[in-house]
Structures are given as structure tokens and as C-alpha cells.
Amino acid sequence: MNPRRPDPLAAGAAVVTVLLWASAFVSIRSAGDAYSPGALALGRLLSGVLALGIICAVRREGPPPRAAWRGIAVSGLLWFGVYMVVLNWGEQQVDAGTAALVVNIGPILIALLGARLLGDVMPPRLLAGMAVSFAGAVTVGLSMSGGGGSSVLGVVLCLLAAVAYAGGVVAQKPALGSASALQVTTYGCLVGAVVCLPFAGQLVHQVADAPLSATLNMVYLGVFPTALAFTTWAYALARTTASRMGATTYAVPALVVLMSWVVLGEVPGLLTLVGGVLCLAGVAVSRSRAAAAAAPRPAKVSGSV
């Protein structure tokens, strides 16, 4: 594949990922009343492992090669494990829109780590797009700060989730040089489920008392925002830089605000909507053709973090 030419399949995969990850913030809020953070993460991961396991069996996909295991293990620990638990906990303290916005300092961390550890090139349009999107995220955050829906603990937890997310992405990128997107996602999800096994007792007790809607939300989180969206993410990540993929997720806050409005009744104000538009505008700039042409990098990166 010519790295200067946009890959329509990778772009489509990125769109699927962003839409499903945005819906995850809303589903977490919906299920969080019935499930504790660890139990929800474990239930989500087990659902994801089951869905991915079935796909691997149908496709006769074997385990990843040894060279990919370090990246898979680190991303599984940080992104599938730590990230999901602390994000669930953080969303019990703040609204879905605020959580998505705080977590989305992650793309900046991804860009910095990607440049330092993976040698990612950051062309001017990518940097400009990230700046615009970050301004949008700050605008939305400020617009929601007076509503009494946030807490210091919630913000700190979401910041920790952002750090885990960034570390997981940068660790995952080299693994995609020797393993398929499905392998990296399946075994990363499995590692995360093992990390969350200490919450198994909570999950068993809470499933018995939880309303069906909360349990269905948990299963949805495992099958779609985890099994499907993490696979489409890995597919797209293998075909571009970690920095550019991270910038794409700046669309998530804008979508979360809209979904929260429709599903949860969390009505956004004018300033919130303006910030959401800035987030989307920044993504458009960072994903423009000129930015792609400015960073002629191979499709895959070998080595490990």
C-alpha cells in the first residue's frame, strides 16, 4: 500500500471505531448504576473474549507470533484492563460528556509517545488539527464545569484512563507489525479479562440483582465497542501512525455529547455544541489529504515498546 494514498477501508474502520467508542461512554453511564467499575469491566471483557473467540474459531485464526506478545501483553494490561476499570469508576463521578473530554487528552499523549518511541512524524496539519480539537475539548469541558456533575476524583480517574489509553495504543502499534488486527485484539482482550478476574465475585453477585437493561448494556459494550471497535481500530492503526489515529478519536467527545443528549437527557448548552464542532473540525484538518502526504511512513512498524 502506498502510504501517501488514503486507504478507504482503514478510514471506514476508523469511523466505525469512533462511533462505537462514543456509544460506549453512554452505555457505561447506563450500566454503572447496577454494576461496580471492576465488575462492569470484567463482564464487558468476557463478552468481548467470547465474541472474538467465536470469530477466531470460524476464521481458524491461530495465536499471534512470539514477537507480538510483548506489545499485546502491555496493551492488554493498560488499555483493556486498567483503562476500562478506571474509566467505569470515573464515569460514576462525572457525566459521559465530561469523561470523554478528559480522556481525550489521550491523543496528545499518544502523539508525544509515538514521536519519542515509534518515530512518528507529526506534520503541521496534524499538529494544527490536534490544537483545534483540543481547544474544542477545553471549550466543552468549561461549558460543563458549572453543572455540578463533576468531581475531583472523577477527573483524576479519567486522566488516569487517558494515560493508560495512550500507553496501550503505543504498545499495540509494534505488535501489529507481526500479528493481525484480530489476533492483537483477541489476545489483548483476554489479557485484560485475566487482569480483571479479581472482580469475578462482584460480577456474579451483581448479575443476579441487575436489571436486564444494565446487563444488556454490559454485553453490548463487550461485543460492539470492545470486540468490533477494537478490531477495526487495530486494522486502521496498522495502516497509519499512532498519532493520526489518536487525533481521529477527538471526534468522540462531540458524538458523546449528542448521544448523551438523546439517550440520557444530558442537554448540552450552546458553548458545548460550539466545542463539539471544534473537535470535529480539528479531526477533519488532521485527517486531510495534505497531512497524509506529509508523513510517508511504512504501513507497519516492527520492534516493541
Image (cartoon, rainbow, N blue to C red):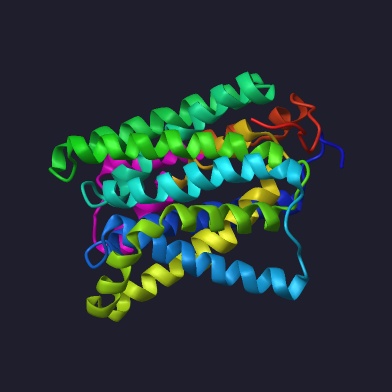
Q: Can residue 29 be seen in this view?
A: yes
Q: Answer with left or right where residue 14 lies relative to residue 28.
A: right
Residue 275 seen in this snapshot:
no
- Is 95 displayed left or right of 138 in the figure? left
Q: Does the magenta stretch include residue 265?
A: yes
Give yes or no for residue 254 being in the magenta stretch: yes
- Residue stretch in magenta: 253-280
Residue 142 shown left or right of residue 21 in the figure: left
Q: From the top left corner, tell me how far across and down residue 9 is, in percent.
A: 74, 54
At horizontal 42% and vertical 58% (from top left) the residue drawn is 24
Residue 296, percent across and down?
80, 27
Q: Quadrant of residue 276?
A: top left
Between residues 83 and 254, which one lies in front from this camera angle? 83
Which quarter of the rendering shows the N terminus? top right
Relative to residue 274, is residue 52 depicted above or below? below
Residue at the left extreme, as displayed: 148
Q: How many marks?
A: 0
Name which quarter of the figure residue 164 lies in: top left
Which residue occupies 55% across, 58% down?
A: 190
Residue at image x 62%, y 56%? 187
Q: Main secondary structure of the magenta part?
A: helix
Quarter of the rendering occupied by the C terminus: top right
Residue 110 x, y percent position in the rendering: 54, 30
Question: Residue at image x 59%, y 34%?
Answer: 170
Looking at the picture, does residue 209 appear above or below residue 48?
below
Work out which residue is located at the far right of the displayed protein and give it. 1
Name the spot of residue 154 as percent of width and height, x first.
24, 41
